[in-house]
Every structure is written in structure tokens, then in C-alpha cells.
Image (cartoon, rainbow, N blue to C red):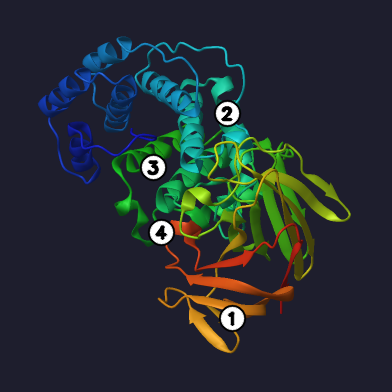
Amino acid sequence: MTFFCEESTSSVKALLTLFIDGKEISKEDIYLSLDDVCCMEDTSMKIDELCLLSVYCFISGFEDTSKVKEALDQVHLLKQESLTDEITYQKLCLSKALLNMPIEERNKKETFAHIKYLTRLDDIALLGVVTFLTGIFRQKESFIIEGVKISELLISLINDSGEMDAFFLLDKGVYKKDSLRASIFILMSLYGSLVDSQRCNDLLPKLDPYEGGLFQTLDIEQRLLCRLLEKALSCRNNEAKIKETPQEVEGLLNLQSDGFSFKSSLYHKVGIGSLSHLDKLVIPSFGPHVLPLGKSDLYGLKQPLALNGDVTDEGLSMWSRVASTEEYGLHWIHSLIKCQDNICKIESFVWSAKAEEGLSLVFFLRGKSIKVLDKVYNSGGLERAYVETSKIDLDVDGRNMQILLKAPLQVEIIPLAGQEFFWNSDFIVSFPFFKSNVLSIDFVMD
């Protein structure tokens, strides 16, 4: 399964697509595809394909698995150096578990069920799925515990509408929405089969990939994993569930009020954070941008981050390094966020070690339209605006959210398409920094 590398056409994928669509495939076709896999030099890609074949053998009842087992025996474990390597290792374990082969476990120095590894949400979700499935089919507690930890981490980042509220972690605004939804559905289904979780039960209908014809659009690995899920759940039908004991996620920063809520991370992040109102995501990501706008590699924050995020009665206060044209980065940004019912206040200023570049604070917004100076700009429109104003009105599903400044500024407004690019946002709104002055913005939901 090519969970982490570029999509490539393979005879295995083509063959198993026929199988999943209800077509018959012969033993000879399986062996020919296996011969192609054995010729691969890239170990990760080879394990991807062997895992696909192992899943096929298991769910189809294919009995003559000796050649697949021989191929798996020839694969040596990769050294664990990254999340990518860990996924490959876990897929090798799942392959062997499905074919009833011995699994070589290794000592892990740390768990991947941690927010600092969430730079690729689809990868961490699939890691949880594969690990969980191995634990269930082989009854290995260490694998199940790891799957539970990843489930609990991700469930803390899902809002009530079933959307992953962690876009501030993602670079360049691109994410695989349908693929991620399917992986989260499988993971939450496995978690719900083990743990008595009302939160999980509430979310599952909103994630179901069989609703709305989504299943037919998924790639072959996701579709096979959905079928494998059915087998896994049948294994657990009569087993008692354990009581859910939610734990605070280390490194997750969360400000809650009866209206607005703000979420961020102490560790890796690209945007400063995200803002929701009544659990509806309004700002998937916001952060500093070196001008001019349009260069995605000049948006957001840069490593190393200042590992602070102090939550007090005054709100959440944090320092972060700004992405820059320089290798080390010239600028630091301080942000103070306060949430109280229907008002969220964000105050930011920039400190620079050297001469300043032009900088702005950029917000990716979701809404049907923006009204400024009596003119309306619609989502998906072609007209950009560059206006001096202290007030912007955003239509959020029929409700009006005011964006208020203490003094007029030259604000840039760019309509977006609202698709998977830019975190499914509808607008970019950019507020310029002026020297070291504090930029103060109030978001008020009517």
C-alpha cells in the first residue's frame, strides 16, 4: 500500500481493483503480479505491495499463500528512523499476521501516538489502522495499546461535525480529505469495538465512507482496508468493551468558551492555530506571511519553535519563529489569544533581530461572502480587494461574524475556491504589521 509515497501504477493494484469491484481473478494472475513485486528494489514499495496481496489472501480465502510468505521472509526489517519507516514496519507486521506468520517485534524508544508526529494526518491515521489490525488479528496487546493511543490522539482533534480540526499542523494547505476520512472511520470503528466511547459512537455516522458514494472513489488500499475492517469487527463481536478513560493530550493547546474555541500545538505547527465557533471551524489556520502574498513557503512558522504556550486567565500566550527568506529566520511573533463566548481577541506583534521584511498576519477564513465598505465579495469569485478599513463582515452560514480593528489598515482580501487546497477555506484576509506595533483583531459573532 503506498501510504506515504507517490502514487504509482502497479499490476497488483490494477488486479486487486478488479477483485474489489467484484470481478474474478485467477491464481496465475496473482503469481504474475507477485513476480513483479519480487523484482522491486525499493523495500518500502515492496512491503506496500506484499501487504496488499496479504490483505487480498485473507479476505478472499486464497489458500495457496506459500509464495507470498516466501517473499515476506525475504524482506528485512527497516531501521526505525521516521514515521514513514514505522508505517512500513507495521505493514510488514500486518502482512505476517494475516498469513499466520511469526512477527519479529522490536523495542520502540518512543510512541508515535504524539502530537509532534502529526505533520501528516493521513499517515498517522493509517499507522493507527495498520497497528490496530495487527493487534486484533494476532491478539497482541502492545499493538492494540498503540492503536488505542493513536485513536485517542486523533479523536481529540475531531470536531462534532466529524472534521479533523488540526489544519494548523499542515503545510501548504493541501490534505487528502476523503482518504483521511476513510482512515479515521476505520480507526474509530476499531477503537469503538474495544472501548465504550459515546464520543466515538457519535462521530462514526459522520465519517462513514459508504455514505454518499465515497467508497467507490477511494483508492484500492483504502477500499481493501474497509473490507478488512469488517473481518476485524466480526472477531470482536462477543468481547466486552473497556471503559473509556480520556487523558489530556500532551502538547495540545486548547482554549474553550461557550462560543469561540482556539486550538494549537506546543510542538510542530505551520499556522499559529485554528478558531472554531460552536464547534464549527471558521479559521482553519492563521499565521504570519512574508510579503508578497502567494508564496506558500513564506507562510507560517519555522523550526525551531519556542516550546512555550502559557494558558492563564488572560488567555493563551506564545512566541514562535516566523518563516523567512533567510535560512535561520529573522523574525519572532508573539500572539495572545482570548476566547469568551461570542468574542475572540487576537493580539500579535513581531520582533526582528535584523532589518524587517514586509510581514502580514494572514487568516484563512470559511464563509459564503465578505462585506467591506458596502461591497460584497463572494467565495470562489475572481475579484480581489485591497482596501483601508477597520471592519469586515463575514457570512458564516447565515450568521454574521465581524472582524474589527482598533484603527483602519490596508487589508487585502483574496477569494478562494473552498476546495481541498488552502484547508477548504473560502477567503484569505491579510492584515499588515507596522514595525513593532501590536496588531489587535476582534472576532465577534452576532
Which kind of residue does numbered mark 4 sit on? Glu
Q: Earlier in the sequence, mark 3 or mark 1?
A: 3
Tell how many labels: 4
Q: Earlier in the sequence, mark 2 or mark 3?
A: 2
Asked whether 97 or 294 is in front, the reply is 294
The residues tagged by marks 2 and 1 sit, at their Cα atoms, a distance apart of: 41 Å
Tell me whether the residue at label 4 lies in contact with that at label 1, contact meaning CB atoms closer than 8 angstroms. no
The residues tagged by marks 2 and 4 sit, at their Cα atoms, a distance apart of: 30 Å
Q: Earlier in the sequence, mark 4 or mark 1?
A: 4
Q: At 53% from the left edge and 20% from the top edge, which residue is drawn?
A: 140
Which kind of residue does numbered mark 1 sit on? Gly
Mark sitting on residue 226: 3
What quarter of the picture does the N terminus occupy?
top left
Mark sitting on residue 112: 2
**Residue 89 x %, y %:** 43, 21
Residue furthest to the bottom: 374
Label 1, secondary structure: give it.
Answer: loop
Up-down relation of residue 428 to residue 46 (above or below)? below
Q: Quadrant of residue 30?
A: top left
Q: Earlier in the sequence, mark 2 or mark 1?
A: 2
Which kind of residue does numbered mark 2 sit on? Phe
* Residue 94 appears in the picture as rendered: yes
Q: Quadrant of residue 262?
A: bottom right
Which residue corresponds to mark 4?
A: 211
The mark lying in front, picked from 4 and 1, is 1
Label 2, secondary structure: give it.
Answer: loop
The residues tagged by marks 2 and 3 sit, at their Cα atoms, a distance apart of: 23 Å
The residues tagged by marks 3 and 1 sit, at their Cα atoms, a distance apart of: 37 Å
Which kind of residue does numbered mark 3 sit on? Cys
The mark lying in front, picked from 2 and 4, is 2
